[in-house]
Image: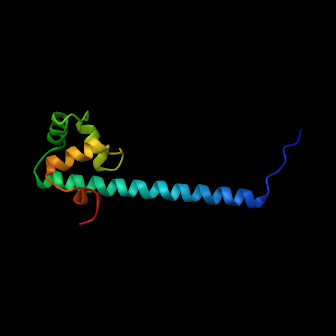
């Protein structure tokens, strides 16, 4: 049995959609790195270690380790809403300072 070939136009559209998807994922990763850099900068300005920040987050009910904080800071891990709220409170910053350029 011979499989019918897809028209070239359909393949081109599929590849174009796939390319846009990868571009979007790359954009999200860059944004997560920016947020992580801001968290690291504010953490260091308060003279907290990653371990100290993780401990403070744990006291506010976040199930997070020092390793997870490190991964957030380099953009290797997503930050969850409860964590972002707790980080905002611990570092005494606004959501705008956390999520947007100064």
Rendering coords of residue 39 (x, y %): 23, 52
Q: Quadrant location of residue 10?
A: bottom right
Residue at point 19% right, 43% down?
A: 50
Residue at x-position 63% and y-position 60%: 16
Residue 100 percent coordinates (x, y): 29, 62
Query: Quarter of the image holding residue 18?
Result: bottom right
* Image x and y of residue 81, in percent: 30, 44
Q: Quadrant of residue 37?
A: bottom left
Residue toward you, 57 or 72: 57
In the visual, does 72 lie left or right of 92? Answer: right
For the C terminus, the image quarter is bottom left
Q: Residue at x 40, y 53 (%)?
A: 29
Instruction: In this rendered view, identify the residue nearer to me: 100 or 1.
Output: 100
In this rendering, position of residue 49 left or right of residue 15 = left
- Where residue 97 sits: x, y (%)? 22, 60
Quarter of the picture containing the N terminus is: top right
Q: Which residue is situated farthest in the bottom direction here?
A: 102
User: Which residue in the rendered view is the most extreme toward the left?
Assistant: 47
At x 26%, y 42%, the residue is 83
Badge count: 0
Q: How is the image coloured?
A: rainbow
Q: Along the horizontal axis of the image, is 100 left or right of 16? A: left
């Amino acid at each position: 049995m011979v499989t019918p070939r897809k028209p070239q136009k359909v393949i081109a559209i599929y590849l174009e959609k796939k390319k846009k998807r990868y571009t979007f994922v790359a954009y999200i990763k860059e944004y997560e790195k920016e947020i992580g850099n801001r968290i690291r900068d504010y953490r260091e300005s308060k003279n907290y270690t990653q371990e100290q920040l993780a401990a403070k987050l744990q006291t506010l009910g976040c199930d997070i380790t020092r390793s997870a904080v490190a991964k957030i800071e380099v953009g290797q891990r997503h930050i969850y809403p409860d964590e972002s709220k707790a980080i905002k409170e611990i570092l005494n910053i606004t959501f705008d300072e956390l999520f947007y350029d100064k």
